[in-house]
Every structure is written in C-alpha cells, then in structure tokens.
Image (cartoon, grey):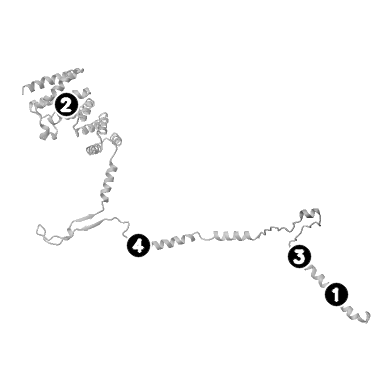
Amino acid sequence: MSFTDRKLETAILGFAIIMVGGMGYLLKAPVQAALGGQDVVYEMPRPKTSFLASLFDLGGREVSRNYVNPFSKKKEDGKKAVQATKPAQAPAKPAVAQKKKEAPKKSEDPRKGKVDVQVVAAERAKGLGDDGFMADSGSAPQRVENSGKNQNVAEQQQTKNTLSGDQWRALMMAQPSKENMAKLLEAYSKKEVDDQTFYTIVTDLFRSNKVETQALALMAVKSNYSLKSFSVTSQYYDQLTPELQQQAHAYLLNYAVSARLAILMAALQSSDVEVVGTAAQVVLAGYQNAKGGVVSSGDPRNSRGDITVNSISGYSKFIPIFQQLAQSHDSAIVTLANTALSQIQSAVASL
C-alpha cells in the first residue's frame, strides 16, 4: 500500500501532532508565570578542568550549611507577649494556700502569746469568823501568781534611773530644786553617788549667786555631819546672805557636842585657815555652853542622849592641838589658840 493509499491515517496522525503542540503552547504560559513567582536559584558556573579549576574545586569536602527559619523570631515574640499578659497574682496562690493551712494551727492554741498571770482564790469554807458572823468565801483574799517578771522589771527600772556623777551634776546645775536635791540625797544615802561627786555639786551650789541655790547647798550639808560638810560650809560662809549665815552658824555649832568633837579636832588640823578659824570658834562656843550647862543646838536630832552629852572634861583633848596652833604664822589663829588654851586649861585644872 502506497502513501496515497493511507491518506486518512496520515491526516489523523498530523492532526494529533498539531493538537498536542497546541496544548503544549497553551499550557506553557501558566507554568512560566508560576515559576516566575519563585526565587531564582543561581549556581556559580564551575570552570572546566584546568589549573584554576583545581583551586576552586571542593574535592569532595563536606559543606556546612545553616538554615535560618525567618518565622522562628515571630514565634518567640508571640510567647513573650502571652507571658506578659498573664496576671501577676498567679505565683501568690501557693502562699495563700499555705496561709489557709496555717490558720487552723494558730487557732488550735489560743493561750499562746498571753501574759502568764493566774489569779488563784484561797479556798475557805464557810463558817463562823472571829466576830461570830458567817465568813463569806467570796471575800477571801486573792493571790496573784507570776513568774518573777515584775521583780525583774523593777530592777531594770531602778538601774535605768541611776544617773552617773556627771549627769547628777548637770541636772542640779540645770534644774536646782528641792525635789532634785531630795533625789540626790536619797541616791547619796544609797551609795549611788560617791563623796567626790556629792561635794562637788554642793560646792557648785554654794558658788551660785542665787539665794535659792545656796539654800539647797546648805540643805545638802545639813543632811550629813562630816569633816567635808564642816569644811565646805566654813569656806563659803562669808558668801552667804545674812539669813543663810544664821542658818549655817546654827549648823556649825551642832558640831560642839561630844559625839562630833572628833570632827572638830580634824578640822583644827586642816591646812585651810578659814576651816581652822571656824573650828576654833566652834570649840570655844561649845566649851562655854558646856561650862554653863547649855546644849548649843537647835537640831531636833540632838535630843538623843548620845549627842547631847557635852561635858567640860571632853575638851581637854583639844589642849595639845591648840598648843600647836599657838605657834602658827597666822595672827588670828594664834589669838584664838591662846584664848582657848587659857580657858580650857584653867577649867581642866579646876576639875
């Protein structure tokens, strides 16, 4: 069969080729458009086999590649935003639950934290009292039991109220009053204030220009008969007002009794001329009162027998002291010593 005899088959085959080619042409445009939206990957052309190719050839070596996901950062930012929006009270829930658990424990023992004080009423049966009436058990005395805390508090308060010497001095200079002087005398009697501090305060008060302040100093020395009190009063006697001098004179004469003659003997041996002169005058005044049978004291405490004894024979012990004072370089002391010797020696000789 020749080609002309197969015209129909040939036409059908040609038509099929044309249809396939037309379909390919129609489908080519969409495929190219889809491929155009994708990233174009370029590959570096490799040189052919040459000397330069051997330099750039990887030679079968492995290449380290690191793939970075551009959407990972957005995911992390989204997680942080979610955590930031969570309520802040969430971590406190365990603490609230813990408090709820501890609440029943605290209520189990309500007695804790209270003062341990028990009031115990003394049991007493009803019966006839001493006066013949029925004794009421409700009126029985009560006893307060404590563990000694009140005593400790009192001791701490007493220690707290104890002032140092400098504090006492500053207090009396800033607030000189009878109330503070009474507190000072009480502290001095309890040995909370030493002699040096006490008489330093007394000296400061005597040096004041105010009558009220000097009166407090005189109040202090009157509470204590001693050589120091006698000496400081004698030294500042001339600086006192006439009214206070009268009180100081009466106070000094209270040393002219048998119980205080030893203080006068020590005062006569002092290195202070004023103290020696005052002591000599007091001895002479006491001797005159003893000679006339008069007790030279207006002090109520001299009503005791151990103080009011004032005999002439007790002044004989002053004779050796006045004999030494008669040789003094001070003319006033020599005059007082000679006067005392002339009176006392004659009186003792006549006994």
- Give the mark, 3 or 4, whose residue is nearer the N terminus: 3
- Which amino acid does the dot numbered 1 rest on? Ile
Q: CA distance from mark 3 to mark 2?
A: 137 Å
Residue 35 image label: 3
- Is 242 on the left or on the right of 170, as rendered? left
Q: Is residue 252 above or below residue 329?
A: below
Please name the amino acid that badge 2 sits on: Met
Cα distance between the residues tagged 2 and 4: 78 Å
Marks 1/3: CA distance?
A: 26 Å
**In x, y percent, where is residue 205?**
26, 31
Picture disc at residue 179: none
Q: Are marks 3 and 2 in contact (CB under 8 Å)?
A: no
Q: Which residue is mark 4?
A: 107
Q: Label 4 is placed on what type of residue?
A: Ser
Between the residue at mark 2 and the residue at mark 1, the CA separation in whole angstroms equals 163 Å
Within 10 Å of the Cα at label 1, are there few (<14), some (14-19), or many (20+) other Cα atoms?
few
> Badge 3: few (under 14), some or many (20 or more) residues near its Cα, within 10 Å?
few
